[in-house]
């Protein structure tokens, strides 16, 4: 499996990126990572990443934004499964194994879990998404997102999915909320939601959602992603694609 990360190697996030890598080294299953350098040079990449042969970088000549950087990095994936990640987050030790086992044993297209908010003091708060645990047929997850302003049905970075499905439903062309669109992978195949935390979402002042002006486009981004997912679900159910 491959973890795809986009980063601009900002100084205040380098330690977070190193911590993300450290959490990957604790996984019990084979993994690779593709790190898209969004207009940054490899010079400031933390040493543990440069020294790890499992980590490959894609250097983009200018900043293109998280959505584009992630999608371009997706072209470099060479494993059957893929997981998105942000450069400031972490994976619990069994995050990969528990989902990979579910994928292999059931033959579904994707497997997700709950996430935890990781606070600056090191404590965590569990986030249970609106989608209930268990198996979900293709498109069913979107029924748990009734309106754009409602809580999204799954954490996008909690999803481990077959690579060909992620390529068919990648990041959306948005300047923020691009990962909402990636939830559309759940429209393409049945999947399983496990009632265990598989991702740690770091809360800190430098995160994108904490920046000034973020709320200005949040409603528009949510509306676009919501319409996209529901339209895709409807088209696939009626056979009009």
Image (cartoon, helix red, strand yellow):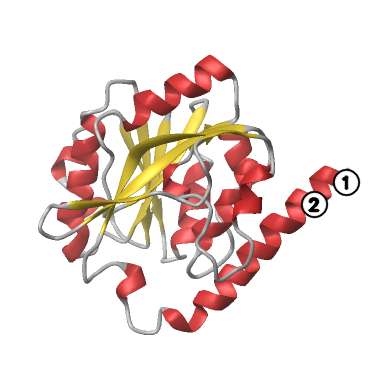
Q: Is residue 213 above or below residue 60?
A: below
Relative side of 194 to 97, left or right: right
Q: Is residue 229 above or below residue 158?
A: below
Disc 1 is placed on an element classified as helix
Q: Where is residue 78 in the image (x, y as percent from the top left)?
A: 49, 29
Q: Where is residue 211 in the image (x, y as percent from the top left)?
A: 32, 77
Residue designated by label 2: 234
Identify the image quadrant of the N terminus. Answer: top left
Q: Is residue 229 visible?
A: yes
Q: Where is residue 224 in the image (x, y as percent from the top left)?
A: 64, 68
What's the mark number on residue 98?
none
Q: How far apart are marks 2 and 1 (CA)?
A: 6 Å
Q: Compare residues 21 and 142 and report the one nearer the observer.
A: 142
Give the residue at x 41% y 36%: 195
What's the mark number on residue 238?
1
Relative side of 54 to 131, left or right: left
Q: Compare residues 239 and 54 and report the one nearer the observer.
A: 239
Give the residue at x 52% y 58%: 152
Q: Where is residue 171 in the image (x, y as percent from the top left)?
A: 55, 54
Relative side of 149 to 158, left or right: right
Q: In this view, does 218 lie above or below 89?
A: below
Disc 2 is placed on an element classified as helix
Give the residue at x 45% y 65%: 65
Q: Is residue 77 visible?
A: no
């Amino acid at each position: 499996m491959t973890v795809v990360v986009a980063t601009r190697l900002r100084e205040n996030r380098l330690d977070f990126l190193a911590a993300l890598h450290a959490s990957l080294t604790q996984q019990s299953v084979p993994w690779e990572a593709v790190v898209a350098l969004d207009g940054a040079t490899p010079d400031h990449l933390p040493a543990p990443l440069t020294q790890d042969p499992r980590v490959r970088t894609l250097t983009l000549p200018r900043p293109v934004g998280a959505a584009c950087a992630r999608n371009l990095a997706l072209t470099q994936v060479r494993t059957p499964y893929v997981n998105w990640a942000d450069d400031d987050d972490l994976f619990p030790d069994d995050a990969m194994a528990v989902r990979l086992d579910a994928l292999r044993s059931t033959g579904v297209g994707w497997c997700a879990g709950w996430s935890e908010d990781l606070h600056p003091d090191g404590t965590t708060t569990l986030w249970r998404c609106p989608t209930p645990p268990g198996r979900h047929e293709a498109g069913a997850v979107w029924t748990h997102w009734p309106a754009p302003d409602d809580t999204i049905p799954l954490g996008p970075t909690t999803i481990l999915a077959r690579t060909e499905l992620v390529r068919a439903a990648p990041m959306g062309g948005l300047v923020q909320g691009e990962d909402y669109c990636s939830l559309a992978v759940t429209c393409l195949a049945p999947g399983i939601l496990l009632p265990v935390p598989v991702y740690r979402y770091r809360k800190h002042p430098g995160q994108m959602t904490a920046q000034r002006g973020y709320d200005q486009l949040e409603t528009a981004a949510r509306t676009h992603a919501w319409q996209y997912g529901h339209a895709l679900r409807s088209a696939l159910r009626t056979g009009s694609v």
